[in-house]
Image: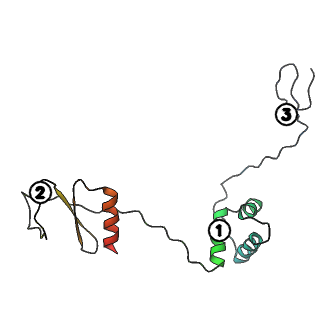
Amino acid sequence: MSRDEAGTDASTGADTGASTRAERIEIVTRGEGRRSYTPEQKVRLVAETLRPGATVQGVSRRHGVCSSLLHRWRREARGEAPQRRVPAPRLLPVRLVSPEVTDAPVPSSRPVDTADPQVEIVLRNGRVLRVGMTADPAAVACLAMALET
């Protein structure tokens, strides 16, 4: 049985695992839970990202820190306000009102068009948004968000 340089059996081509090249294998586990960093550690890591030639990605790999954390710490060090995500539009209770059958009179600034039934949306601040049933849902969500502020 003869073997080549890579450690494969020449007769079968099977890998025997006896390679002459050393390979680096890194095993990442998530069992340790969320890590916490002291203010001194944060300052040291942020300072390392600011060195000439250093990158956030390189520092994060070298120290096993998520790159998004390093970016956040850099923004905090610059005194920038944390970025707020725009909340997704929430579903609100809706009551469909038929023009023929109503519980109470619906105040309206214009006559009701029976050809295009409308949906009335009462916002949290008390404002009322009336749109046709064929209105674009994305446009209605944008209007509702704008009227709630």
Label 1 sits on what residue type? His
Local SS, label 1: helix
Q: Nearer the viewer, mark 1 or mark 3?
A: 1
In the rendering, at what x and y percent does residue 34 appear?
A: 63, 63
The CA distance from mark 3 to mark 2 is: 76 Å
The residue positioned 26% from the left and 62% from the top of the image is 93
Task: Tell me the residue that label 2 is attached to.
Answer: 98
Answer few, some or many: residues within 10 Å of disc 1's Cα (few below 14, many 20 plus, some between 14 and 19).
some
* Mark sitting earlier along the chain (1/3): 3
Q: Disc 3 marks which amino acid? A: Gly
Residue 149 in the image: above or below residue 140: below
| Lower position in the chain sequence, tag 3 or tag 2 | 3
Q: Is residue 50 left or right of residue 21?
A: left
Residue at the extreme bottom of the image, as rendered: 79
Disc 1/disc 3 C-alpha distance (Å): 41 Å
Kindly identify which residue carries mark 3.
17
Marks 3 and 2: which is nearer the front?
Answer: 2
Look at the image and tell me in which quarter the C terminus lies. bottom left
Q: Nearer the viewer, residue 110 or 140?
A: 110
Residue 105: image x %, image y %? 8, 68
Residue bearing mark 1? 71
Neighbour class for label 2 at 10 Å: few (<14), some, many (≥20)?
few
Task: Locate the N terminus by quadrant.
Answer: top right
Q: Considering depth in this image, is 68 or 142 the residue closer to the camera?
A: 142
